[in-house]
């Protein structure tokens, strides 16, 4: 079956401001995010892509713009099912403020039971995203043959939920995963099982050094996961 190349959008203005953007309109890439997007065509130069699929949000379309410019024949599709999680009333609020909400403990430790007020559940988020990927896998294989690769540009929690599904990992464990802005994750699907062949690869390992800004642990105080995906290393 197909190989799925998952790209998280580049660093956004909300990431650097410490906000949970969600589906708030008008959130684009910051200066570093723009540079990350500009480097993406070179990082994927050796990968032939059958097509690209994007979340409808601005930051994802901005991330893919340099790649599409470098590959004029690459078809772009937009799929609402790989949109950011609908955080409802949490959208646009500061992550530091949200850390004090009782629901945050559920989001961190029992996400399959978490439902955002005025938004969706994390379980529903994973279900729609997995359904979309299964359908795109079948379409890509039917139209481009076995072994074809395609790219999906989406968001941190969406990508983590897709990786959890590929690994047979319960959603309650998905906060153990981490994907930086503009990182590449690859899943190779076969008839009997998926294989995770890349996870959150940015090509930059400097942030893993002890004491480096943003590293080595991709987590907040007490091991809390970064809801929405975080801003990555400076």
Image (cartoon, rainbow, N blue to C red):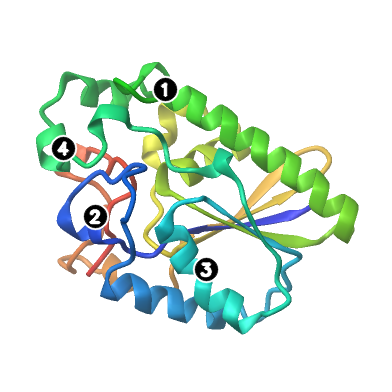
Query: What residue sits right under mark 4 in the picture?
Result: 222
Residue placed at 47% from the left, 27% from the top? 171
Residue bearing mark 3? 64
Q: Residues within 10 Å of mark 1 (few under 14, many from 20)?
A: many
Q: Nearer the viewer, residue 62 or 225?
A: 62
Q: On the image, which quarter does residue 194 sit in?
A: top right
Is residue 76 visible in the rendered image? The answer is: yes
**Labels 2 & 3 near each other (Cβ < 8 A):** no
Local SS, label 4: helix
Q: Secondary structure at mark 2?
A: helix
Q: CA distance from mark 3 to mark 1?
A: 28 Å
Q: Earlier in the sequence, mark 4 or mark 2?
A: 2
Depth check: 172 or 129 in front? Answer: 129
- Answer yes or no: do the residues labelled 1 and 4 have beta carbons within 8 Å? no
Q: Position of residue 127 (x, y in %)?
A: 57, 28
Cα separation, mark 4 vs mark 3, equals: 35 Å
* Label 1 sits on residue: 121
- C-alpha span from label 4 to label 2: 23 Å
Residue under pointer 2: 14
Picture quadrant where residue 118 is located:
top left
């Amino acid at each position: 079956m197909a190989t799925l190349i998952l790209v998280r959008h580049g660093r956004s203005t909300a990431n650097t401001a410490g906000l949970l953007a969600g589906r708030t309109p008008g959130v684009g890439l910051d200066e570093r995010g723009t540079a990350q997007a500009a480097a993406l065509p070179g990082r994927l130069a050796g990968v032939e892509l059958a097509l690209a699929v994007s979340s409808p949000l601005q930051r994802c379309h901005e991330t893919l713009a340099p790649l599409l410019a470098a590959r004029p024949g690459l078809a772009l599709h937009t799929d609402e099912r790989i949109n950011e999680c609908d955080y409802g009333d949490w959208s646009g609020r500061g992550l530091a403020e949200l850390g004090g909400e009782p629901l945050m403990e559920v989001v961190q430790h029992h996400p399959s039971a978490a439902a955002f007020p005025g938004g969706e559940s994390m379980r529903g988020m994973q279900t729609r995203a997995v359904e979309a990927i299964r359908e795109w896998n079948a379409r890509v294989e039917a139209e481009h043959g076995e072994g074809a690769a395609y790219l999906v540009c989406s968001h941190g929690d969406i990508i983590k939920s897709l990786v959890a599904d590929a690994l047979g990992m319960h959603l309650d464990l998905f906060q153990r995963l981490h994907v930086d802005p503009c990182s590449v994750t690859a899943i190779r699907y076969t008839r009997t099982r998926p294989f995770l062949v890349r996870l959150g690869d940015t090509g930059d390992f400097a942030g893993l050094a002890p004491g480096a800004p943003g590293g080595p642990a991709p987590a907040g105080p007490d091991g809390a996961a970064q809801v929405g995906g975080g801003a990555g290393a400076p």
